[in-house]
């Protein structure tokens, strides 16, 4: 099954929503700002500044994080035009996500966003036109050479599908016993299958954007990734191990069948920094401007300062639930979700490990 059919962040603004449980992702957006600012500086300093700037955010979701990078991008460009003694450009903002994203919520918050931009930047800001674009960023979404600045946060680690070798439809299926992602006990072929799926997807992403972005246009993207070559390192696997352990407990409790657990794998991959660089070079349409590692403390979801393991575990469970529940529910059924996330929280609280969450930030310039 394609990820597009089952991945959906928890909608709305309720206690369980993605909007209220996306502190990790907010921290990543903040950590990405220096690379974003450098890219914007360069974007604004190269030759002719257009009268209308087209910006796209890919995997925008809904809630405060949808607007955070966009407001930074637009405010910076607006300031730069002013410094050049020019009128503010018009802005065309495209917000992309999979079709089942809570676009209604996004659309309802457009006028508030525009008001905030005028309040912060002056009444001469814009005009700014906002458009929702449903579809997968692993294919074409926009006309040729129509985008100037593309941003993506916490979205490119989602694969278009579970690697086919792990699919129940494969005649020689790889079985990742008792696990739902790469782990120390997975057969080595599991990590190879994930890497190959990432390579196909990331290169399809770059190819599509290379057709849509104007020469000298930009991509700034942050995705979960590795600073270590070992694909089963705890930095990228520990949370998935905890989730697998919670599912094993549900099997022991007779709430789900073992076969159900063995046939579930996450459509997710954290690439090694060199894998990302190699794919960019191989695809060939972009100049690599920056590729950096950022990290946030293991309890970043709980402020990253006060050590309160049980509270962190509870918040971590809510954050992971807001992102993953649609997929888990589709496979295991909704009736076991409360018990599953309770077990996950208990397992995290009972452990003593404090493993940082690592991401990669890449900025790219479309070759002329
Ligand atoms: C964890 S959220 C990140 C949202 C927001 N950018 C942030 O930083 O908080 C990941 C988003 O990427 C979207 N996504 C995943 N795969 C996608 C694809 N192939 N095409 C478009 N959006 C995708 C998901 O639907 C989800 O809304």
Image (spheres, helix red, strand yellow):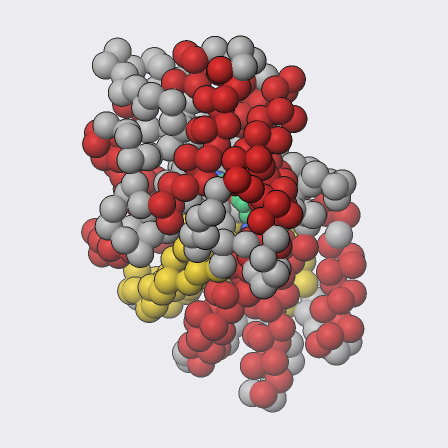
Q: Quadrant of the C terminus?
A: bottom left
**For residue 144, side relative to residue 338 (left or right):** left
**Whether residue 223 can be seen here:** no
Would you place residue 93 above or below residue 271 in this image? below
Whole-percent x, y for residue 344 in the image? 55, 33
Image quadrant in which you'd find residue 198: top left
Would you place residue 150 above or below residue 196 in this image? below
Q: Quadrant of the N terminus?
A: top left
Residue nearest the observer in this picture, 39 or 338: 338
Whole-percent x, y for residue 99 in the image? 58, 34
Image quadrant in which you'd find residue 88: bottom right
**For residue 53, side relative to residue 163 (left or right):** right
Q: Residue at x 57, y 35 (%)?
A: 346
Would you place residue 37 above or below residue 209 in this image? below
**For residue 124, side relative to residue 242 (left or right):** right
Residue nearest the observer in this picture, 126 or 240: 240
Would you place residue 291 above or below residue 258 in this image? below
Whole-percent x, y for residue 118 in the image? 75, 71
Residue nearest the observer in this picture, 265 or 218: 265
Residue nearest the observer in this picture, 289 or 14: 14
Image quadrant in which you'd find residue 80: bottom right
**Whether residue 183 can be seen here:** yes
Q: Residue at x 37, y 32 (%)?
A: 181
Q: Residue at x 58, y 26 (%)?
A: 340
Q: How many marks?
A: 0
Whole-percent x, y for residue 27 in the image? 55, 60
Q: Residue at x 49, y 54 (%)?
A: 298
């Amino acid at each position: 099954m394609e990820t597009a059919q089952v991945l959906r962040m928890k909608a709305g603004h309720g206690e369980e929503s993605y909007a209220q449980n996306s502190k990790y992702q907010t921290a990543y957006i903040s950590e990405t700002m220096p690379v974003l600012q450098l890219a914007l500086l360069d974007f604004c300093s190269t030759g002719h500044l257009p009268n209308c700037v087209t910006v796209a955010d890919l995997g925008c979701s809904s809630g405060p994080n949808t607007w955070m990078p966009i407001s930074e991008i637009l405010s910076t460009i607006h300031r730069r035009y002013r410094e050049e003694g020019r009128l503010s450009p018009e802005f065309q903002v495209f917000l992309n996500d999979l079709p089942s994203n809570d676009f209604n919520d996004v659309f309802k918050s457009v006028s508030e966003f525009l008001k905030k931009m005028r309040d912060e930047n002056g009444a001469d800001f814009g005009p700014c036109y906002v458009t929702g674009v449903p579809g997968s960023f692993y294919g074409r979404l926009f006309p040729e050479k129509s985008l100037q600045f593309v941003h993506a946060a916490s979205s490119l680690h989602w694969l278009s599908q579970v690697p086919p070798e792990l699919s129940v439809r494969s005649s020689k299926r790889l079985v990742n016993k008792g696990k739902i992602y790469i782990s120390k006990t997975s057969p080595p072929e599991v990590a190879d299958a994930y890497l190959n799926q990432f390579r196909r997807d990331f290169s399809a992403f770059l190819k599509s954007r290379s057709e849509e972005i104007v020469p000298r246009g930009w991509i700034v993207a942050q995705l979960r990734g590795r600073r270590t070559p070992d694909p089963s390192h705890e930095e990228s696997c520990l949370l998935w191990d905890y989730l697998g352990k919670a599912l094993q407990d549900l099997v022991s409790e007779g709430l789900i069948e073992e076969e159900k657990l063995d046939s579930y794998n996450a459509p997710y991959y954290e690439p090694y920094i060199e894998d990302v660089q190699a794919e960019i070079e191989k695809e060939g349409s972009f100049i690599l401007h920056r590729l950096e590692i950022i990290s946030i403390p293991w309890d970043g979801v709980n402020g990253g300062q006060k050590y309160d393991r049980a509270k962190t575990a509870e918040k971590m469970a809510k954050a992971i639930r807001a992102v993953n529940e649609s997929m888990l529910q589709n496979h295991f059924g909704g009736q076991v979700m409360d018990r599953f996330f309770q077990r996950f929280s208990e397992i995290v609280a009972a452990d003593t490990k404090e493993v940082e969450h690592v991401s990669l930030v890449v900025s790219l310039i479309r070759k002329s």
